[in-house]
Amino acid sequence: GDPDNYIAYYRRATVFLAMGKSKAALPDLTKVIELKMDFTAVSEVEHCVEHVEEEEADRLKQTGTRRKSTGRVCVWDAELRELRAECFIQEGEPRKAISDLKAASKLKNDNTEAFYKISTLYYQLGDHELSLRSVLLIWSLFAVEIGMSELLLIMFHSFNRYMDAASKYESVMKTEPSVAEYTIRSKERICHCFSKDEKPVEAIRVCSEVLQMEPDNVDALKDRAEAYLIEEMYDE
């Protein structure tokens, strides 16, 4: 068929999604974004919607209804980006999902759902600073009834207590022991705290633990090097 037929790519992507094949849907969704950055017919989108999961279908149909007055639906919008982000999440590529969700948050006003997902993904990756930043942005948009999960509330309150203390990082790290990335990032910060607090023995120990998991971790290498200098272990 026509390699520039974005509707065909979109149809095939939605069929893949209905079959639970998110990995197969990703290239087609990306192709749609590349080929068609302006508009497509509502009827075509509504036809595709029949093949999407019920939740996504309802959302896309609502979008189509809102825009029928123009007779066209914008493909380069939050819905398509959010759909591809879900595929990335299912395929274990959270950072790519975050990239799409950030784009979606800019394309739709007050997109608290996108910020919420971004915050959750950053938390799962162990980057609680960026997670908190997304939470605060949600609060700035809607001060009440934002419906944050208990997990994020725990993260938010913990952050204020442990951000400058290694002992607090250790306690928070235990809240999500099954998330490897979170453990690494927490240990990385513990290493940094010990280094800046001029506790070289502890810094060397924790930094070495980080480097066992991530040999090329620049921050851990730098903090451990500073600890070695304090201990006058110049050969290390």
Image (cartoon, rainbow, N blue to C red):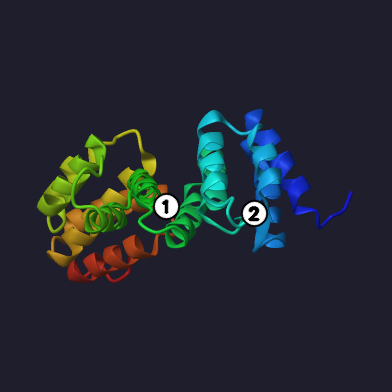
Between residue 38 and residue 199, name the one nearer to us: 38
Q: Nearer the viewer, residue 227 or 191?
A: 191
Image vertical order of residue 229 relative to residue 122, above or below: below
Disc 2 is placed on an element classified as loop
Q: Residue furthest right?
A: 1
Q: Amino acid at mark 2?
A: Gly
The answer to whether one can see residue 175 in this image is no
Which type of secondary structure does the marked residue at label 1 adopt?
loop
- Residue visible at 59% across and 59% down in the picture: 76
Dot 2, crowdedness within 10 Å: few (<14), some or many (≥20)? few
Q: Using the image, tell me which numbered label, if any, was put on residue 71.
A: 2
**Residue 29 placement (x, y as % from top left):** 66, 49
Q: Is 28 on the left or on the right of 149, as rendered?
A: right
**Could you tell me the amino acid type at mark 1?**
Glu
Image quadrant holding the C terminus, namely bottom left
Give the mark toward the camera: 1 or 2.
2
Q: Where is residue 4, by image quadrant? A: bottom right
| Closer-to-camera residue (107/189) | 107
What's the residue at 71%, 48% (across, down)?
Answer: 28
Position above or below: 99 against 21: below
Give the residue at x 40% y 47%.
Answer: 213
Mark 1 highlights which residue?
A: 214
Judging depth in this view, the residue of 23 and 83 nearest the camera is 83
Q: CA distance from mark 1 to mark 2?
A: 53 Å
* Residue 113, x across and y down, in percent: 38, 46
Tell me which label, 1 or 2, sits earlier in the chain. 2
Is 201 left or right of 8, judged from the image as shown?
left
